[in-house]
Amino acid sequence: MVLMPNTGHQINPMLPQFQIDTNFDLPTYLAEQKALVEKALDNSISIVYPEKIYEAMRYSLLAGGKRLRPILCLATCELAGGNIEMAMPTACALEMIHTMSLIHDDLPAMDNDDYRRGKLTNHKVYGEDIAILAGDGLLAYAFEFVATQTKNVLPQQVLEVIARLGKAVGAAGLVGGQVVDLASEGLSQVSEKTLHFIHTHKTGALLEASVVCGAILASASEINLQKLSRYAQNIGLAFQIVDDILDITATTEELGKTAGKDLEAQKATYPAIWGLEKSRCQAQILVQNAKAELEVFGEKALPLIALADFIISRTN
Ligand code: GRG
């Protein structure tokens, strides 16, 4: 059985894979893009009265992390002919949404974790009440930020981005995935179909929105949006398989959060169903399929190709 993302297309591991000769320097690219994102995030929220909530929002938003979602958004916007300035407000909003989901995920009512990104979780520092509100504040601000800060993009495109973000966050995306994840915890058997639903919604939806929103801001054609969307669905699933693998193979220090939580909470994971070796192999197939969707873009796709490789080679 070969794992399929929600692309409507069968994965064929026998297909010749898209190869492009590249000396693309991913570590430098990641460091530069990350620095731009960090600066924009730092400028996005200032501390005013009531200070406590703004401090709590900034605590988690500026706690580090790979910044993968904003970097994907910026890269896709550039690939589709746009520029970083057009996409930065959406890139920041994606990180605000991602961060709020981590704050809520770490709460005692959900995953109950004490550490995230190598630091104490938001509720451990500010208390559960403020952590819930910090998440709510970030979520609301993300939409305000896109609506008020996006420049040099047609209103129709901004509206489309807001609609896509809303869908990715709500019951049709992250929230829906989290609900099924919580309901599946501790069950002796979770089907592959259910696991697929959890991960395409809980993790895949926001990664897909990151890529697609970048392309929308640059007025990409419908056919290119579809290719980029399939690229994102493939890397989204690969990302989650690797996340499941790392939960078993990496240390708490490497992850910046408690390792081995999935086993402890008896969570359904890909390694639990397939074992480590097949999980690694499936992640690789998904990344190859993701890269094949980029063939038409030629050299402009180098950052997205390198980011797809990064998703399976990462150690945290
Ligand atoms: C979105 C309204 C709303 C509520 C939240 C709690 C919840 C509903 C959803 C859970 C979403 C969740 C925590 C998914 C896990 C996604 C994931 C794999 C996170 C790790 O992402 P990385 O590795 O983390 O990109 P860094 O720290 O590098 O940013």
Image: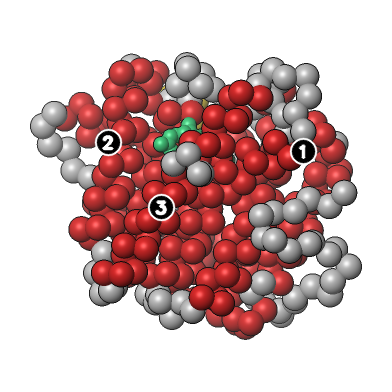
Q: Amino acid at mark 2?
A: Gly
Q: Is residue 256 visible?
A: no
- The residue drawn where x is 50% and y is 62% is 211
Q: Identify the amino acid type marked 1.
A: Glu
Residue tagged by mark 3? 165
Label 3 sits on what residue type? Leu
Q: Separation of disc 2 and disc 3 at Cα?
A: 16 Å
Residue 11 in view in this figure: yes
Q: Nearer the viewer, mark 2 or mark 1?
A: 1
Residue 6, given in percent of the width and then of the height, sits at: 66, 55
Q: Nearer the viewer, mark 2 or mark 3?
A: 3
Q: Earlier in the sequence, mark 2 or mark 1?
A: 2
Q: Going 28% across and 42% down the picture, which residue do you hit?
A: 140
Give the Cα distance between marks 2 and 1: 35 Å
Above or below 185: residue 160: below
Looking at the image, residue 143 sits to the left or right of residue 114; the answer is: left
